[in-house]
Image (spheres, grey):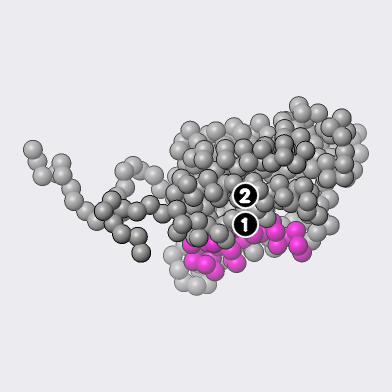
């Protein structure tokens, strides 16, 4: 036996070749189906908006690190993920300059001022979305009908399924379930195609980038509370940004709990707040607010659910 077979080193111990860049590229790959779906449903303008958000996020991260004389981190591709997720949370008609302001809030305020990747207290893309929603409410709630970019189809504004439900619409007045699954309905450019989001979520779980605990618990909580509040659970799951939030934003490493029990608590909290806003709040959608509020509680959840080392004493 050679001495190389037993190596004693301090933590951290790397068991494989995983890296931040590799994880982020997997997330980008998982988002590609939704990118394609957004282009098919809302046209080239969706791709322009996504490209602008990605470019702006990368630029702001590069600029901040340059000005502060810190090692540049644009190579880890986390800014690319933030840009795509922020774009996915915007309507297709959002003016580019407004979207760029949202990118500045996401990267400069929510991420870099707190130390960069891994040290942000909340999901940067959701911070950018909420800043835009508060600042430019009209533009953030103006929805283009799907396929309005095609010749012969008049570009009009319509309500989202959640807005219709909020105003008492019957199931018969909502888009057919097939349209909900394929994305042919009003909404933000990255949240409408359920099939694309599910494919991306399954890919992330298969690659072990995320675990199913948060997404499945979040969705299950929404289903249970939909029954409790007398709402249609199928439409509550496939409407709005629930699947986008459950698979891609609630699972953010930096802003979600590390323990399994903590993840369950976190996801249940997200589901409860989401349904409370949908059922009783003034906004028809509550995914963004629910995840941000639970992000703030994550340190407390981690502290309450941390495991005691064998033989250790919890102080």
Q: Nearer the viewer, residue 107 or 280?
A: 280
User: Badge 1: few (under 14), some or many (20 or more) residues near its Cα, within 10 Å?
Assistant: many
Q: Main secondary structure of the magenta part?
A: helix
Image quadrant where one finds the C terminus: bottom left
From mark 1 to mark 2, how far is it between C-alphas?
9 Å
Q: Is residue 305 magenta?
A: no
Q: According to the image, label 1 marks what residue?
A: 292
User: Badge 2: few (under 14), some or many (20 or more) residues near its Cα, within 10 Å?
Assistant: many
User: Residue drawn 28% across and 51% down?
Assistant: 310
Whichever of callouts 1 and 2 sits on the residue coming sooner in the sequence is 2
Task: Determine whether 100 is above or below 23 in the image.
Answer: below
Q: According to the image, label 2 marks what residue?
A: 270
Q: Is residue 130 magenta?
A: yes
What residue occupies the far left of the structure in this picture?
1
Q: Nearer the viewer, residue 60 or 135?
A: 135
Residue 106 point in image, percent of width and height: 62, 60
Q: Which residues are magenta?
A: 106-135
User: Residue drawn 60% across and 50% down?
Assistant: 269
Task: Determine whether 261 is above or below 255 in the image.
Answer: above
Task: Determine whether 165 is above or below 73 in the image.
Answer: above
Q: In this rendering, would 147 be left or right of 288?
A: right
Q: Is residue 48 visible?
A: no
Residue 102 point in image, percent of width and height: 68, 60
């Amino acid at each position: 036996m050679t001495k190389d077979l037993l190596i004693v080193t301090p933590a951290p111990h790397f068991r494989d070749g995983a890296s931040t860049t590799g994880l982020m590229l997997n997330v980008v790959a998982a988002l590609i189906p939704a990118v394609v779906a957004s282009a098919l449903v809302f046209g080239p303008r969706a791709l322009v908006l996504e490209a602008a958000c990605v470019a702006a996020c990368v630029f702001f991260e590069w600029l901040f690190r340059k000005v502060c004389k810190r090692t540049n981190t644009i190579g880890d591709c986390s800014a690319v993920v933030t840009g795509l997720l922020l774009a996915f949370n915007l309507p297709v008609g959002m003016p580019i300059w407004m979207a760029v302001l949202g990118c500045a809030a996401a990267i400069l305020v929510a991420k870099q001022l707190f130390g960069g990747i891994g040290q942000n207290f909340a999901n940067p893309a959701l911070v950018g979305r909420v800043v835009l929603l508060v600042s430019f409410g009209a533009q953030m709630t103006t929805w283009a009908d799907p396929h309005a970019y095609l010749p012969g189809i008049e570009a009009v504004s319509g309500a989202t399924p959640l807005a219709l439900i909020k105003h008492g619409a019957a199931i018969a007045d909502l888009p057919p379930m097939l349209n909900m699954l394929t994305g042919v309905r009003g909404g933000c450019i990255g949240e409408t195609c359920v099939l694309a989001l599910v494919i991306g979520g399954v890919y992330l779980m298969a690659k072990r980038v995320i675990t199913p605990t948060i997404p499945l618990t979040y969705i299950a909580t929404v289903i249970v509370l939909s029954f409790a509040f007398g709402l249609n659970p199928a439409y509550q799951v496939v409407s709005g940004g629930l699947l986008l939030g459950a698979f891609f934003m609630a699972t953010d490493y930096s802003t979600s709990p590390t323990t399994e029990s903590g993840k369950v608590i976190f996801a249940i909290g997200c589901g409860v707040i989401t349904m409370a806003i949908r059922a009783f709040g003034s906004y028809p959608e509550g995914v963004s607010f629910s995840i941000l509020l639970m992000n703030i509680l994550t340190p407390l959840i981690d502290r309450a659910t941390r495991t005691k080392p064998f033989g250790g004493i919890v102080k």
